[in-house]
Image: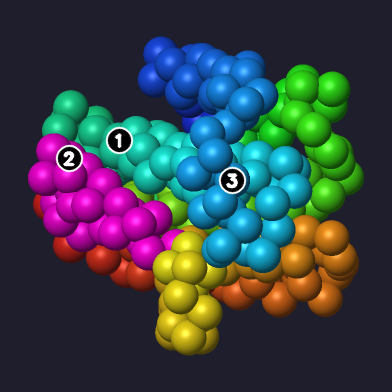
């Protein structure tokens, strides 16, 4: 299992779609600080109204999490997870794998874990590049706070990848499953920060996993383990449950 996971991870890193996703992330890291060098007044006013903080670093974090990374975890996980199990079925390889001493459920777990590992590699690489690129280009940029906040948000990337893999397998068709996964993740992204804009709805929005990944935005000045660990553990648990559900659903896939 471990050997198969490692080989699949290495193979996925060499795929064209992975390199395209990496290029998109590098472009975002390089361009966003330039776009925020002089943000429009209405953007500053909106941030001040929503988060009671017009600090340039808070503006950057809002844009980076909501307008960049939340969009990334809508599309990239779906792209990475779209081939889990169903590609092998469509190419006729799944019948051969079914004859091996490896159950379809365990194979799904390995392939999904591999997709999650690739997503995490891309994500961590982007955050480290941003931590090196943004100081001096974003006013008041705090690398330690940035990496702490993004370490929490990284768990949303893992959840989104597992969620996409499970949804696509449950639908049973790569094209239709990809569209459904994109739609569902898009809805979650769209509602992720509603609780910040409308505080009376905040408790209700916590059922959204992508809201959990943005909780660091509530108090960037005082991020600590008590703020980060609970949502991290919750997202890790949701990811594990999602993969378990997918492992159960994949048994119905026709070989």
Q: Are marks 1 and 3 in contact (CB under 8 Å)?
A: no
Task: Report, in whole angstroms, how far the alpha carbon at label 1 lies from the one at label 3.
Answer: 41 Å
Residue assigned mark 1: 83
The crowd level at tag 2 (other Cα within 10 Å; few <14, some 14-19, many 20+) is many
Q: Is 192 situated left or right of 145 in this image?
A: left
Residue under the point 75% across and 48% down: 55
x and y percent of residue 59 in the render?
Answer: 64, 45
**166 up-or-down from 240: above or below:** above
- Label 2's element? helix
Task: Report, in whole angstroms, how far the alpha carbon at label 2 lies from the one at label 3.
Answer: 42 Å
Task: Between residue 55 and residue 191, name the one nearer to us.
Answer: 55
x and y percent of residue 196 in the render?
Answer: 53, 69
The crowd level at tag 1 (other Cα within 10 Å; few <14, some 14-19, many 20+) is many
- Magenta residues span 166-192
Task: Between residue 5 and residue 61, name the one nearer to us.
Answer: 61
**146 up-or-down from 187: above or below:** above
Q: Which mark is residue 95?
A: none
x and y percent of residue 161 in the render?
Answer: 44, 48
Residue assigned mark 3: 44
Visible residue check, residue 97:
no
Is residue 171 shown in magenta? yes
Visible residue check, residue 78:
yes
Q: Are marks 2 and 1 in contact (CB under 8 Å)?
A: yes
- Label 3's element? helix
Residue assigned mark 2: 174
Task: Between residue 55 and residue 105, name the one nearer to us.
Answer: 55
Which is nearer the N-term, disc 2 or disc 3?
A: 3
């Amino acid at each position: 299992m471990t050997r198969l996971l490692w080989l699949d991870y290495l193979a996925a890193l060499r795929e064209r779609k992975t390199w395209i996703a990496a290029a998109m992330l590098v472009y975002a890291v390089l361009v966003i600080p330039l776009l925020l060098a002089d943000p429009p007044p209405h953007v500053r006013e909106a941030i001040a109204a929503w988060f009671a903080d017009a600090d340039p670093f808070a503006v950057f974090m809002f844009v980076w999490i909501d307008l960049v990374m939340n969009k990334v975890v809508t599309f990239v996980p779906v792209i990475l997870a779209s081939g889990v199990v169903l590609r092998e079925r469509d190419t006729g390889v799944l019948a051969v794998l079914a004859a091996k001493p490896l159950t379809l459920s365990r194979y799904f777990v390995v392939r999904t874990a591999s997709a999650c590992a690739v997503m995490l590699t891309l994500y961590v690489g982007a955050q480290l590049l941003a931590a090196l690129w943004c100081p001096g280009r974003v006013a008041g940029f705090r690398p330690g706070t940035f990496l702490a906040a993004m370490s929490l948000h990284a768990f949303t990337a893992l959840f989104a990848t597992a969620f996409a893999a499970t949804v696509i397998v449950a639908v049973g068709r790569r094209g239709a499953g990809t569209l459904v996964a994109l739609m569902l993740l898009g809805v979650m992204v769209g509602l992720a920060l509603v609780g910040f804009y409308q505080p009376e709805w905040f408790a209700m929005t916590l059922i959204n996993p992508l809201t959990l990944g943005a909780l660091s935005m509530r108090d960037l000045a005082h991020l600590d383990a008590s703020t980060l660990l609970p949502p991290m553990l919750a997202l890790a648990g949701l990811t594990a449950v999602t993969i378990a559900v997918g492992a159960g659903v994949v048994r119905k896939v026709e070989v």
